[in-house]
Amino acid sequence: MLAPGRTYSPASSVVASPSRRPSYAPPTILTPHHSIAGSVMPGTEEKKKKKPPPPFLQKEVKIKNPKEINHSMLLQILHKKFLSDYEKWQKKTRTFKMANLIVTIIIISVQVTQVVLFQLNDKTLSSATKKAVATILPSITSAILALQLKLGWSEKGTRCKKAAALFKKLAIHSKYRMEMLEAGGVFSDTSKIWNLALISESSEIPAFVSAY
């Protein structure tokens, strides 16, 4: 009930009018690319970017006349090449490993010599000579270690070993295919082996490895 002398006014009503009701923003619909907070997850835009094409020398060569390929002749050529490359890289591997082993043996010999000389008494080897040896031998060892690090024969030997292993696998694969052809088997994907060897040699095999 209203108090005496007062009239009813819509503004004094407890219930707000529809025009004065507060407005709220529409809810955010989450997608797999959004996080819980509603923002776009990092890395989504990067996934949309296309990968750059491989270099020209590492692209697969498209052959227009695959049916005209003499698979037996191609396998013989590839097998001969794989064996030749395997022997070449295997020879380089042995050379670098042997050179690195020789340098390591020299370093160990110098260190052992230094220890032995200092165990001799002053009658056999004078103190002045020991002081000279203590100065000269460490310098020689440091110089040999610096040379070994500069040449990097161990790392070069490892690279040559990986190249030899790759050509060995290709040679074995081509040999088994040649045996299948001799037994009467027929297949038409020899060009894939050729492309595989081309891309592998362009991307994984070092073009040139020198001793220094």
Image (cartoon, rainbow, N blue to C red):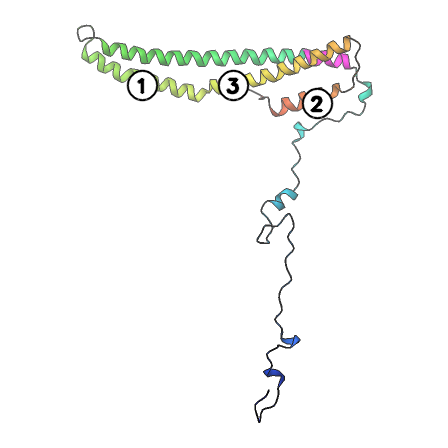
Which residue is denoted by mark 3 in the rendering? Answer: 158
Q: Where residue 139 is drawn, which disc sits there? A: 1
Residue 73 belongs to magenta span: yes
Q: Position of residue 6 (x, y in %)?
A: 58, 91
Amino acid carrying mark 2 in the image: Asn
From which residue to which does the magenta span run? Answer: 71-79
Q: Residue at left 38%, top 19%? A: 145
Residue 161 lies, with reference to residue 182, above or below; the image says below
Residue extending furthest toward the bottom: 5
Query: Could you tell me which secondary element the residue under label 2 belongs to?
Result: helix
Q: Nearer the viewer, residue 105 or 6?
A: 6
Q: Residue at left 80%, top 25%? A: 64
Which residue is denoted by mark 2 in the rendering? Answer: 195
Residue 17 lies, with reference to residue 109, above or below; the image says below
Amino acid carrying mark 3 in the image: Thr
Q: For the residues carrying marks 2 and 1, which lies nearer the camera in this image?
A: 2
Q: Residues within 10 Å of mark 2 (few under 14, many from 20)?
A: some
Q: Position of residue 59 (x, y in %)?
A: 68, 29
Q: Residue at left 62%, top 16%? A: 167
Along the polypeptide, which appears first: circle 2 or circle 1? Answer: 1
Main SS, magenta residues: helix
